[in-house]
Amino acid sequence: MNLLSFDPYSKTGFAICRICKSSVHQSGSHYCQGCAYKKGICAMCGKKVLDTKNYKQTSV
């Protein structure tokens, strides 16, 4: 079985976020969408995609 394939019956279907330790919602990702948005990084690879220095970031 491929490591990145989705298994709906497994308890650990997805990985955990490297920042907040919650489960990610996309197979192959290392960061959850909330942390990726707050940091301005790609959820899959972690590269900086947005400079959040002058933004007021909220996740509400």
Image (cartoon, rainbow, N blue to C red):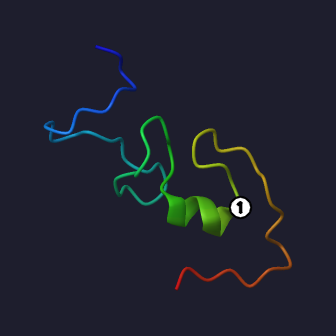
Question: Eyeballing the image, is 11 above or below 2?
Answer: below
Question: Eyeballing the image, is 58 above or below 5?
Answer: below
Question: Eyeballing the image, is 33 above or below 16?
Answer: below
Does residue 11 appear to the left or right of 51 in the view shown? left
Residue at image point 74% right, 85% down: 56
Give 38 or 10, whichever is nearer the viewer: 10
Number of dots carrying numbers: 1
Q: Position of residue 5 (x, y in %)?
A: 35, 26
Give 6 or 20, whichever is nearer the viewer: 6
Give 32 or 1, whichever is nearer the viewer: 1
According to the picture, the residue beneath numbered tag 1 turns out to be: 40
Q: Position of residue 23 (x, y in %)?
A: 34, 53
Q: Quadrant of the N terminus?
A: top left
Does residue 12 appear to the left or right of 14 in the view shown? left
Residue at image point 80% right, 80% down: 55
- Secondary structure beneath disc 1? loop
